[in-house]
Image (cartoon, coloured by chain):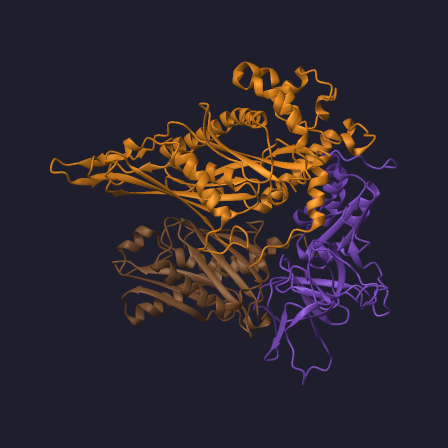
Chain colours: A brown, B orange, C purple
Amino acid sequence: MSQHLCEIGYLSRSDGSSLYCIGGTVVLASVNGPGDVKASNRHYNRTQLDVCYSPSTGQSMIGERALESVISKTIEQAIIVHLHPRTAINVTLQEMQSDGLALSTSINAACLALLDAGVQMKSTFSAVTCCIASSGAIILEPTEAEIKESSAVVTFVFDGLEYNVLSAYQDGSLDSDTFNLCLIKCQLAAKDITAIFRKTIEDKHKFDKS
Amino acid sequence: MRETPLSTCERAAVLAAISRGVRLDNRGFLEVRDINLSFGKEYGSCTVTLGETRVLAQVTCEVVEPRPSRPNEGKLSISVRLSPMAAPHFESGRGNELMDELQMILDRNIKESRCLDLEALCIMAEESVWQLRVDVTVLNHAGNLGDACNLAAVAALRHFHRPDVSVEEDGRVTIHTFEESEPIATYMKKVPVCLTYAFFIIDENIHMLMDPSEKEERVMSGKLVVGLNPHGEITSLIFPGRVLLSKKDIMNCIKSAFKKAKFSAEMIQNLVDEDIVKRKSSVKVDGFAKNLISDTVYASHMVKKTIDKGQNFKFQVPRESDEENGSLNDEMDEDINDEESGDDNSDAKPNKSDILWRIQSIRQASTKDDDATHSMETDGESEEEEKKPKLTAQDLI
Amino acid sequence: MDSDITESLYIVLPGDQVLRFNPEENRDRIFIGPGLRWQDNVVRATKPGMLKKNGKNLYFVDTHQKRYIPQKREFVIGIVLKKKGDNYVIDIGGSEYATISYLSFENASKKTRKEMKPGDLIYGQLLVANKDMEPELVCIDVYNRAVGMGTLPGDGIMFTIPLHIARMVVDPQNPFLLMMGKQINYTVVVGFNGRVWIKARTQREKVAIMNAFTMLELMPLEEAVDSIPMFFSGFSVHLREDM
């Protein structure tokens, strides 16, 4: 597994923010809300969730829109949307440095930022990416160069309760046995990520009397 | 999301503090917040923090066809983005006044000042040239975005290296990877610097301060954004807001800006060069992963600084009779202090540290220099002096 | 156990199981406060933070957050935005604006109505606050007395702090506030929405107090209390003579 680094309370003007690094990929996430929302996006029974992802270079294109929709659907499953009707939660993600793992780093960054903002959630969630090298070996958290060489890339997002799959995103072709193998490997890695979240939050509350 | 309204109380507090020589973050009037630059893994990616203001700039390049009117020049484009990350009330993908202003500052300072040698970006005249694209993203808006964006864009451009190319005889262009051939640095002739001065009109006095914070920007009457380079050239001058300044005052601002610009430009150059040298010698670059400092860490640094200052300061504090002379501008620019003390006007108080930094005093302090360098203005000067008291707060607010 | 004492248990993340509770089997009652949810006979956390429990079996999660969510009976500082019919529209930092009737002030009647200008600050209590309704403020208690509520004078200074710090300093016996009081004479009003209003003799003192609050976010309370004198002299604020 690549090295994970993270920090919260990154931006003074956001309600919650986090910087998450997996290997060479660095994503900055900011969460604002629950706040007011335009009448056109207002739901009478739930929170409107807006996810905005910007790549490190250039304009946001169709690829980024696709990524946004995967992230937004994942987050929507985790947060308890009906607690604050007629509000909006904005999640803004900025890729600072790219090395192939934009999706999983963004999702982990978003989770930490939501935790920092204190948004009510059913559970935490964590994402792990792996790829199948040409030799058939499964590489967890590959670099961009390794992804280019690989035959398939899979990203899984797990919840923090039973480590059930919240979403899976796949590129390339692979057989079902390999897929299951990837799933098991990623599931194990997801537990480590939840431990990182826990440590970060414990660190945030270190001055609370215990 | 909407912006939190500014209450009358907050506005009054900022103004009252300034009129007493205090800023809400305990800075001197001409004190700029801490500047910190860190570079990403790739060439041309740079984050700048100016206090809690945080800006990311990334440079990318591609080979394009040149403009027919300038067949042997490369292209340079700069774009600024303000997302809800910077402040909750910004909407993504939608422009606003602030974004237009920043775009204008950067275009004028970097593109139109021609600080970059665009001809060096030419690969084959009329056929192919390099296009450099600078993406400036504001991550945290805590005031003075103009200076921060300019700093980030300039540092990123200076840090940027483009791949080497070779042109075959038949006109085919091969782009070499960084492994095959050493990348080429961008050559920047002059480092453009941007400095912002905010003006506050309180009881008919104009107060000036540098590097306004977000709250100060919301309260200020107007500002002067000077784009310049240490070679003595002004690249842009923006003066929005409802403040009237005499020619002389603006000249004095610019003069003091030049002094700061030299320092600022050297700082960018040194930091960029230092990082590039490090890159060329060591094998692995950490990039942003280990080098970025969060606002929480910055805030605790500032608190520690104040406490340390308090520890050293404790037994020297003189007792003030009233708060009226409550400005202890020991952080004030040294040469400005020198000017002040060399001047024998009656308004200036004897104690150097008690001098309130006002436009009034800038003018008086540097009258002599001005006569020498700008003799053209001498005849208009007496007229300006008379006009001055008429520019009252009543007709401005 | 003394019912006033709140004990801190441990840090929880959303989804963590706090305890199992089946109302048909368990005889003793428990109370679930903010940040917890009871579903399928299991109580789970929904917010990250310190799980706390008081003597009356009330469990809740103390979260660090910046965004205010209005709660009934909480005291808040609002900014007057405009007048709308018989009401004023007030920004209290929540997702919706709150309203206050011009009659909800001490000694206010239809003839002597309370006049406020946009931008004024108001300290009031939330009478109505729930997810489906617009929050409503009042500046009187049940006996029609102001008890300190009403508009705040404009010569103070207002700033925001994280909500958990606000909950901490809302206690007038807080050692941090008391220690500052030993150094400087000041008046403080704390709203649960993270807004704090300060009044002191000089501008420099106001600014120093405002900045001192950041210490609470960054260090343990005891250390913050001990650092106050140094912090104030760092701001060149002159301590009271008895110090």
x and y, in percent, of residue B13 in the image: 71, 44
Write the residue at 57% across / 18% down.
B379
The quarter of the picture where residue A121 lies is bottom right
Q: Is residue B106 left or right of residue B64?
A: right
Q: Pick out the residue farthest to the bottom.
A: C24
Does residue B179 appear in this view? Answer: no
Write the residue at 56% across / 53% down.
A14
Q: Is residue B42 left or right of residue C206?
A: left
- In the image, residue C53 sits, relative to residue B65, either above or below, namely below
- In the image, residue C69 sits, relative to residue B178, either above or below, namely below
Q: Pick out the residue farthest to the top.
A: B372
The quarter of the picture where residue B3 lies is bottom right
x and y, in percent, of residue B279 in the image: 38, 35
x and y, in percent, of residue B125 in the image: 20, 35
Q: Nearer the viewer, residue A96 or C6?
A: A96
Q: Is residue A131 left or right of residue C129?
A: left
x and y, in percent, of residue A116 in the image: 57, 57
Total numbered labels: 0
Q: Quadrant of the N terminus of chain B?
A: bottom right
Q: Pick out the residue farthest to the right.
A: C242
Q: Quadrant of the C terminus of chain B?
A: top right
- In the image, residue B18 sits, relative to residue B82, either above or below, namely above
Does residue A187 appear in this view? Answer: yes
The quarter of the picture where residue B171 lies is top left
